[in-house]
Image (cartoon, rainbow, N blue to C red):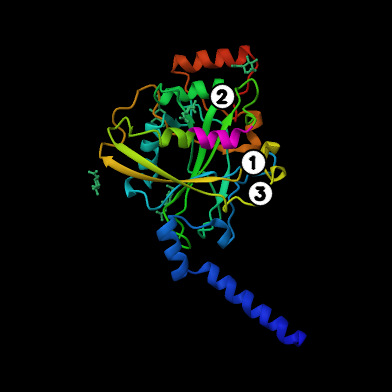
């Protein structure tokens, strides 16, 4: 084989490959999304690890809500209503916007995007219960929607992990990624779920050990090993409700984030009208805590 033709063959192949990867998915890929309900980010330059962490290492996207789920859960509002049925609320504590955002590139043509939101376990105390999570630690997750035009599956990619308490600076617990996934999925698949707004859901689970295969602990934030399993959930709405109703008034939820790198110096936006914030702050200051991720 002549070197020249090999090289031009390679060049042609790479031009074809790059135009192919930026085009709409092929028929084969589209069928894959129709059966799987998501596109593997790696097939189009993305990754199953998040970015923009303080260490530069990623956190695993270890749960996917399949794009084959009912469309009512595949938007920010619908998904956060569903999350509340699992006792996860948007991660701001009484409107204190805290912590940093991470990014994910889901291979959908949108590149690395900041998380759509961060959700924290609310200890069944309504939206205000996320303050307990911030203080005591517990399960939390960030999520992104795979909806760019290059891979528009509508699937929701979740990075779940159990974090330690505020004294311990919210480091990830030992085995915190696998445990975060298992607690989330364990609750999701435990039976019929009911959201504050009266929706009911049932969830089925499959898992993939391919998506995260080959990732080692040294590539992962906090150097914590993972078993490499990604759980893929299909959510069915079995009863419709009304998004946004029935929530506790303790907090409206909505969280804003600042870049993780600056979170160490603590960028808190305070709403001091709320005495609970003052109490929490008093507790924090007294124990020398920093309310960051
Ligand atoms: C994709 O999802 C994000 C996050 O909810 C949303 O802001 C955006 O409008 C969606 N894009 C499309 C094309 O639907
Ligand atoms: C955080 O956990 C450590 C170790 O268990 C404990 O000593 C500390 O009191 C805890 N802090 C809070 C705020 O719960
Ligand atoms: C449900 O979630 C809570 C909080 O993360 C956890 O303590 C519990 O073990 C989970 N339940 C199951 C069945 O996984
Ligand atoms: C819920 O509402 C959606 C949108 O109106 C509808 O397509 C779906 O069939 C309804 N589901 C149930 C279980 O009533
Ligand atoms: C939280 O902030 C939002 C937006 O700034 C505001 O609309 C809402 O009333 C606030 N909620 C509380 C409980 O202060």
Write down the residue under mark 2.
Answer: 137
Few, some or many residues within 10 Å of mark 2 (<14, 14–19, 20+): many
Foreground: disc 3 or disc 2: 3
Q: Measured from the top left, where is residue 128 in percent x and y?
A: 43, 23
Q: Secondary structure at mark 2?
A: loop
Q: Measured from the top left, where is residue 122 in percent x and y?
A: 45, 25
Of the numbered discs 1 and 3, the one sitting upstream in the chain is 1
Q: Measured from the top left, where is residue 3 in percent x and y?
A: 77, 84
Few, some or many residues within 10 Å of mark 3 (<14, 14–19, 20+): some
Write down the residue under mark 1.
Answer: 53
- The residue closer to the viewer here, 158 or 183, is 183
- Can you tell which quarter of the image residue 259 is in? top right
- Quadrant location of the C terminus in the rendered image: top right
Rounded to the nearest whole Å, what is the CA distance between mark 1 and mark 3? Answer: 17 Å
- The residue closer to the viewer here, 59 or 247, is 59
Residue at image location 62% in from the left, 51% down from the top: 213
- The prevailing secondary structure element of the residues shown in magenta is helix
Of the numbered discs 1 and 2, the one sitting upstream in the chain is 1
Q: Is mark 2 within 8 Å of ligand 2?
A: yes
Is residue 25 in sight in this rendering?
Answer: no
Residue 80 vs 156, above or below: the answer is above
Residue 215, numbered circle: 3
- In magenta, the rendered stretch is 175-183
Rounded to the nearest whole Å, what is the CA distance between mark 3 and mark 2? Answer: 26 Å
């Amino acid at each position: 084989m002549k070197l020249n033709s090999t090289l031009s063959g390679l060049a042609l192949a790479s031009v074809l490959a790059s135009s192919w990867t930026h085009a709409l998915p092929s028929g084969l890929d589209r069928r894959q999304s129709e059966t799987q309900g998501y596109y593997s980010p790696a097939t189009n330059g993305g990754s199953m690890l998040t970015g923009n962490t303080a260490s530069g290492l990623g956190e695993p996207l270890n749960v996917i809500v399949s794009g084959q789920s009912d469309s009512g859960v595949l938007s920010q509002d619908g998904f956060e209503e569903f999350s509340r049925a699992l006792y996860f609320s948007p991660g701001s504590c009484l409107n204190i916007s805290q912590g940093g955002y991470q990014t994910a590139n889901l291979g959908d043509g949108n590149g690395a995007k900041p998380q759509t939101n961060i959700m924290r376990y609310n200890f069944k105390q309504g939206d205000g219960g996320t303050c307990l999570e911030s203080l005591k630690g517990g399960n939390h997750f960030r999520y992104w929607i795979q909806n760019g035009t290059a891979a528009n599956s509508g699937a929701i990619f979740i990075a779940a992990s159990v974090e330690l308490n505020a004294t311990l600076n919210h480091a990830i617990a030992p085995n915190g990624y696998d445990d975060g996934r298992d607690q989330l999925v364990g609750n999701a698949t435990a039976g019929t779920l009911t959201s504050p707004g009266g929706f009911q859901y049932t969830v089925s689970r499959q898992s993939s050990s391919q998506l995260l295969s080959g990732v080692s602990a040294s590539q992962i934030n906090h150097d914590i090993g993972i078993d490499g399993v990604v759980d893929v959930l299909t959510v069915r709405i079995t009863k419709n409700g009304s998004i946004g109703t029935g929530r506790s008034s303790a907090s409206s939820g909505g969280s804003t984030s600042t870049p993780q790198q600056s979170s160490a110096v603590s960028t808190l936006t305070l709403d001091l009208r709320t005495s609970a914030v003052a109490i929490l702050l008093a507790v924090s200051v007294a124990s020398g805590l920093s309310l960051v991720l």
